[in-house]
Image (cartoon, rainbow, N blue to C red):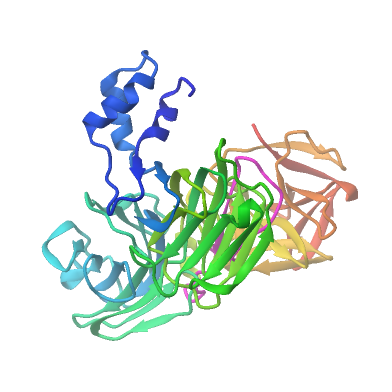
Amino acid sequence: MTNSLNDTNLLAVMLITNTVRPTLLDKANLETLIFPRVVASFSKNILLASLTNNLINLAALSTEDKLEYNFYPVTSGQVQFRVKAPNDAHIALTTGPHEGEPMYEVFIGGWGNSKSVIRKNRTKPEVAETETPGILTADDFRGFWIRWRDGEITVGKEGEPNAFLSYSDPEPFGIGYFGACTGWGASGEWLIEGRIPLKTKDELVYKYHAVRAGALFIEVKAQSNAHVALTDAKKETNPMYEVMLGGWENTASVIRYDRKKPDKVRVDTPNLLNQNEFKRFSISWLDGRITVRSGDQRGPVIMDWIDPNPIGVSYIGVRTGWGAKGVWKLRFEQNLGYPSSFGSSHDQKNPNVAPSAPLEVRGLDTGSHCWCDAAGGMVPPGAVEGGRDDEPLFVGRAHHEGALLPGKVKPSHSVCYVPWGGAEHGKTDYQVLCGCHPSWVSVSGGNIPANAIPAGETEDGEPLFVGRVHHEDTLTIGKVQASHGVCYIPFGGAEVGFPDYEIMVSQ
């Protein structure tokens, strides 16, 4: 154990999984079990505060040689949407595809389009409310996001990173579905991330959809047979997903659907697990795509399967068996394949483009640089601005003809333009570089600085970088291809090459 405060969080929750209902350690037990192992330089009170504040973020637990799942609620996710309605746009967050307890409801523009609230279990008083006069309109689409993590529900406007409504639930539950409806004299048109447009009548009846995405980071120490279940209730359900790691005496791993054979995926994984060493894995789900990786969400893929009829995932269960016991550490995460943010006011110029994102964008490992999925002119908060053409242009990239190409996101056109094959191509699904502060340096030819940021690759696997040039009163972003000795920009329908340009580099 290293001498750092963060490492103590790994001890935050100790659960014995043959109990009917796992319970968190109370403060006294934390003090008894953990403090003898913590370096003396940290204050006991500070440690207790840190540990109790991080209990739900990373759980450590043990599983016996017993094929019985122990379930924990999924604690992070989001839904993003635009709605056109005069008032009363309602969103329900539930465990299953129906109304019932527990559930949250978010009412946007209620009470004659004057107020917005969060309600739990269809019971007053509201758990959160705020005045929001004129927040909706029947004439234009207005965009919003709702996020939940560890029981904290936040509601915000498209293009704004800060929430205007929030609630922290001391007794959170797993959210696998959301529902949308309008009422109280209002009909609505909805554009929901990744789905076809939806219309709701003036009737308070929710239409339900499975939550799109989530991810789980796992550390497990077991000799074999570490099983993870993904379900829509706190029990084994029909249907359900199961990921079985190191089965068949630690020789193979599978993805199984609805507890039935044949398995959807089976791969040979000799010696995948170790009873003396923690092994790390990531399991993510996005629109029915179940991906299992070694390490974190950027690690190599072990298994991958797409369910054509995805279920909502509200809970995960873990177990060991067939002669194996296990020690686990679990952490819920945001799915990196899902947009971390949603929208910009720019894309209101084309509101009828339904927000959607590709299931997965494969490319080079860009280290700590974050590429956020987006579509239809959306520009996430924190996007890197790299040029200008009557409006800001943002650094983007998109797939085309087997290549992953850097280019320019022009919000008013609702696309990312990329250069390829002598032409300019507009892509409605793309990624935007976010959350970093790169620099630009002047270069010429194929002289690529060592700290240039990789941003894509050609169809033949050659790395591509982000460049920009001044051209016809614009500062336009494009791709740098070292073997050609130029920066290509997409401009006026053509791919135009320049031997002198600026290239994007890490500071």
Q: Judge left or right: residue 167 versus residue 7.
A: left
The image shows residue 97, relative to residue 408, as above or below, that is: below
What residue is rendered at 45% in x and 54% in y? 319
Residue with the most extreme left position: 125
Could you say which is closer to the camera, residue 372 or residue 138?
372
Answer whether residue 139 is visible to the viewer in this image.
no
What residue is rendered at 35% in x and 39% in y? 14
Q: Judge left or right: residue 350 versus residue 199.
A: right
What residue is rendered at 27% in x and 26% in y? 31
Answer whether residue 473 is visible to the viewer in this image.
yes
Q: Is residue 364 magenta?
A: yes
> Most prominent secondary structure in the magenta stretch?
loop
Quadrant assignment for the C terminus = top right
Could you say which is closer to the camera, residue 35 or residue 426?
35
Q: Judge left or right: residue 334 versus residue 459.
A: left
**x then y, percent, for residue 336:** 54, 53
**x then y, percent, for residue 501:** 78, 44
Extent of the magenta region: 350-377
Residue with the most extreme front position: 323
**x then y, percent, for residue 36:** 34, 19
Could you say which is closer to the camera, residue 394 or residue 47?
47
